[in-house]
Amino acid sequence: MGTNKVRLQKAVLYFSPYLFIFLGITFWRMFFFTFQNASYQYVLLDALRDDFFSGLLHLINNVAISFWRTVFGVWIYSFGTIGTTGFGPLTLTMMLVLLFSVIVLVGLYLFKFTDRGDLNDRDFAKQAGLIGLVFWGLSGGSVWLIGIVPQFNFSIDRFMLPFMLGASLILACLIALIKNQRTQMILLALLIGFAVSRQFRLEEIFRSDWKTQQNLFWQMSTRIPALEKGTILISNDLPVTYFSDNSLSGPLNWIYSPPGEMNVILYFASVRVGKTLPNLEPGQPHQLYYVGPTFYGSTSNIVMFKYEPPGCLRVLDPEIDSVNRLLPESLRNIDQYSNQAVILFDRQAELPVQFYGDEPEYNWCYYFEQAELARQMGDWGQVVELGNTAFALEDYPNDPIERFVFIEGYAHNGDWEKALELSDVSYKISKKFVGPPLCKLWTRIARETESTREQKVTMDIVQNKFECLP
């Protein structure tokens, strides 16, 4: 009894600093934090007030689902998704080698060097189970209060975190209750092996996400030197797993806003249009509180872009993209609200090199972004010069629309043959999808270039070859 009392006193002593921090934060959140419900409401309390028994059943259901997912489902998920990584052959092979190596090494260690009595401690099982259930139950209060059930997908998977300690103790209890020690060892080796392989997969996904983010902002800063204050950037869902438009708005403002200000914001069209951003008609004020700064903007200052690697980042051109069926579905039918006029040329955005490193080597996308910027500035000679350099690279466009800026540049410079050649290359990729925007492009070229004999001959060829209406 004395030993238990001493252990309890030490536990309280060691835990007290963390307890004081917890109580301090709780007190601040309860009485001083003014944005307690900025993102989530007290769904459970509202449900209990409306119909107590129905709300209670809803709570019990959420608790049961949470228990299954956090104690059992999360491990089954690691087993069940082993073949759906999307990795290339080399990375997948490395992951599988790591998986089986860890299973074998852990199994050997348990069978050779572990005291068999350590794996069959009933007292430990009871203590771990009881403490685990208490911690697990306390962890879920704030989650169930706002009507959330933990899930495996980003970003709701963050609600798994509070349950980690309790779930781990419950799992240890369940393993300790298995009577056959060989089964215990095999199960433990499998769990550790698949946990390690899961961490390998997560590391690879984070690495890929980070590479995508680096390329996104380097290309963006090349194409968009600066933006008017209050600009809303709208894009397709970017090909990242663990970033959202919320999280990407942070570095976006490091690049385009003075320190401490939030002058721009990024929205994924599929998530925000019609919801956070209910109306795209120009002239509508828009603001959003970001648990710190508040963004103030206007729907008159919208820039839309598409980014689907290995294709380049491309700012939408409403005249061309109105018939572009290669656009992601979330951007179709709203491209007309993109306003390139809010892109400024009086200063150059700079990426924080301490995070994003040095500028990458110039490739096709660099010259494409520079050419798009030169086109917007009306510098057709620069477009042609960039095109000559880009087409001499051992690189190439991954989207047929990326040739359009150079088609337009060569046409404005009177090189009709080169403009037709590039048009033909793009058209052959997909007549059905490339044809309509290509015809729109040539309609603009005809309108903006001098009417000469060469132009008229070229336009006749365009109308016949690409099936464009006169």
Image (cartoon, grey):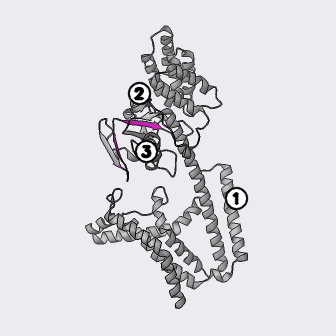
According to the picture, the residue beneath numbered tag 2 turns out to be 319
| Tag 3: amino acid | Pro
Residue at image coords 61%, 25%: 389
> Badges 3 and 2: C-beta atoms under 8 Å apart?
no
**Disc 2 residue crowd, few under 14, some 14–19, many 20+, Cα 10 Å:** some
Looking at the picture, how far across and down is residue 81, in whole percent? Answer: 57, 58
Residue at image coords 30%, 67%: 45
According to the picture, the residue beneath numbered tag 3 turns out to be 259
User: Which residues are the magenta region?
Assistant: 289-306
Distance (Cα) linking label 3 and label 2: 36 Å
Distance (Cα) linking label 3 and label 1: 47 Å
Label 1: which secondary element: helix
According to the picture, the residue beneath numbered tag 1 turns out to be 97
Looking at the picture, how far across and down is residue 463, in whole percent? Answer: 48, 18
Q: Nearer the viewer, mark 3 or mark 1?
A: 3
The C terminus sits in image quarter? top left
Nearest the camera: 430 or 185?
Answer: 185
Residue 295 highlighted magenta (yes or no): yes
Residue 156 highlighted magenta (yes or no): no
| Tag 2: amino acid | Glu
| Tag 1: amino acid | Val
Is 354 placed left or right of 162 in the picture? right
